[in-house]
Amino acid sequence: MPQFAANLSLLYTELPFLQRFAAAAADGFRAVEFLFPYAYEAAELKQALDAAGLRQVLFNAPPGNWDAGERGLACLPDRQAEFREGMAQALHYAAALNCPRLHVMAGIAPADVQPQRLHACYVENLRWAAQNAQDQGVQLCIEAINPIDMPGYYLQRQAQALAVVAAVGAPNLAVQFDVYHCQVSEGDVSRKLREVMARGLLGHVQIAGAPDRHEPHEGELRVEALLTLLDELGYTGYVGCEYRPRAGTRAGLGWLKPWL
């Protein structure tokens, strides 16, 4: 059965960030993920994890200037030095938090750069990053993100993600499959999830309801069917609960209780 991780960047936002760890543990979670740790000292986050008895299972490598609209650096040819510095910082936090997995964001594709150059830079950066992460025993993931939530994002479809992983050829590079992004971008979620799993490339799963990104039992996707499919496929990794609660985190956790 899949294990569940509370995404503390979207859940429990009614609380200050460092108080969200204990709240997640009180609701039955045994693991957490979040977008970025870099506003806090690693030791401070580790203390919050340990006090709540939680495991950190995922966070993102530095994305560039998030507030200015940047969404990753991996495909940007003129930002390779900054990308490598960011990966070093991410791996430092991963070691301190005992986190086995990092999401490497591709970035917004510049309109004035040829697609072939973006692809070559993306593959080169991921290959370099995967080698460095492998030395530390860390898995890297890439995630297709829908163009409505993140216009211009370089990696938008599951087939593209699979092709990039194949081009990089690193044993510790996998696909982070977000069912919400897949449904909004292209649909056919179950078949695409089966394909990624069949190739042995499913590193992490995230869920939310579509199209509004609220609780995953709402909207177009049937969360019970998806979780049952993951069981049938033998997926034993983590499912990140990365959704925006409609009316408070705890009030909306009824869908999860049968699975905990």
Image: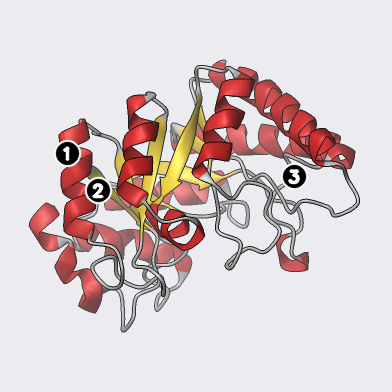
Q: Amino acid at mark 1?
A: Asp
The numbered dot on residue 253 is: none
3D distance between C-alphas at marks 1 and 2: 19 Å
Q: Earlier in the sequence, mark 1 or mark 3?
A: 3
The number of discs equals: 3
**Which quadrant of the figure contains the N terminus?**
top left
Mark 1: give few (<14), some (14-19) or many (20+) Cα within 10 Å. Answer: few
Which residue is pictured at 38% across the width and 42% down the height? 192
Circle 2 residue = 30
Q: Amino acid at mark 3?
A: Leu
User: How many angstroms separate mark 1 from mark 3 (CA)?
Assistant: 34 Å
The three-letter amino acid code for the residue at tag 2 is: Arg
Name the residue tied to disc 1: 231
Question: Counting residues from the N terminus, which is met first, the one under dot 2 or under dot 3?
Answer: 2
Q: Residues within 10 Å of mark 3 (few under 14, many from 20)?
A: many
**According to the image, label 3 marks what residue?**
73
Query: Of circles 1 and 3, which is in front?
Result: 1
Q: Is residue 96 visible?
A: no
- Does residue 229 appear left or right of residue 220 in this picture? left
Residue drawn at (24%, 54%) of the image: 29
Q: Position of residue 112 (x, y in %)?
A: 91, 51
Q: Secondary structure at mark 2?
A: loop
Q: Nearer the viewer, residue 130 or 36?
A: 130
Furthest residue in direction left, as rendered? 258
Of labels 2 and 3, the one closer to you: 3
**Picture layout, residue 44 above or below residue 124:** below
When the figure is inspected, residue 87 is found, relative to residue 16, above or below; the finding is: above
- Residue 219: x and y in percent read 30, 73
